[in-house]
Image (spheres, rainbow, N blue to C red):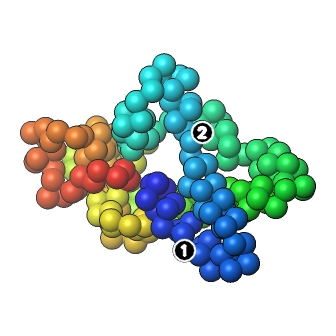
Amino acid sequence: MRVRDHIALSTAAVAPLSPWLGRRALYAWAAGIGLDVDHYLWFCASGRRWNPIAAVRLFNEPAPPQNAATRLFHTPFALVTVALLGLRRQGVRAVVLGMALHVALDAYHKQRVDRTRVLALRRDDYTCQVCGLRGPELATHMSQQPRLLPSYELRHHVTVCSACHEAAHAAVPSAADRQMRPAIPATASGG
């Protein structure tokens, strides 16, 4: 899920709680958004670069790195550790609430995307809709990404091979990308 989606959903979730949480609602909100800092820390440690723009580009690629190291703060261990620290401090409890919200949103997003992916692959008969390739190396691309919040509508997803998926995500359209653009409009947000 994109950062701007986490900002919108965290705001919508925490705003109604602000009468009860007071300024601690800001802690929950910030934790709900800031949890993805583990992706950036992994990027810096593994690539020895401190460029946040390059990190965003990497995680917006068709197949971004997804391993335990990129999701260090998303683990039950991290949540329990922060929850134990919060036994004595109310502000830390709000941080746990924000972290848990973020992890729950990620789990929901993954489940919905996975389901939509399977449906798109079946609908397209496991065939790349750009070049016609059939086989196990197929992915789905979100051909129409709303500005805010992801789309789980099947009509917005299309089956593509890895080469066509890379072309759809390319920053500078190639001749092949221009040829396929009517079939798959590239999105800057990933898909």
Name the amino acid type tagged 2.
Answer: Asp
Q: Is residue 143 visible?
A: yes
Q: Position of residue 98 (x, y in %)?
A: 67, 60
Residue at image point 54% right, 74% down: 12
Which mark, residue 12?
Answer: 1
Helix or strand or loop: what does disc 2 sit on?
helix
Relative horizontal placement of residue 112, taking residue 142 as reference (left or right):
right
Q: Residues within 10 Å of mark 1 (few under 14, many from 20)?
A: few
Q: What is the number of the mark on residue 173?
A: none
Residues under numbered marks 1 and 2 in contact, where contact means CB atoms less than 8 Å apart: no
Provide residue 153's location: percent of width, then percent of height. Answer: 40, 72
Horizontal side of 119 relative to 161 (left or right) equals right
**Residue type at the position of mark 1:** Ala
Q: Is residue 133 visible?
A: no
Instruction: In this rendered view, identify the residue nearer to me: 132 or 37.
Output: 37
Q: Label 2 neighbourhood size at 10 Å, few (<14), some (14-19), many (20+)?
A: some
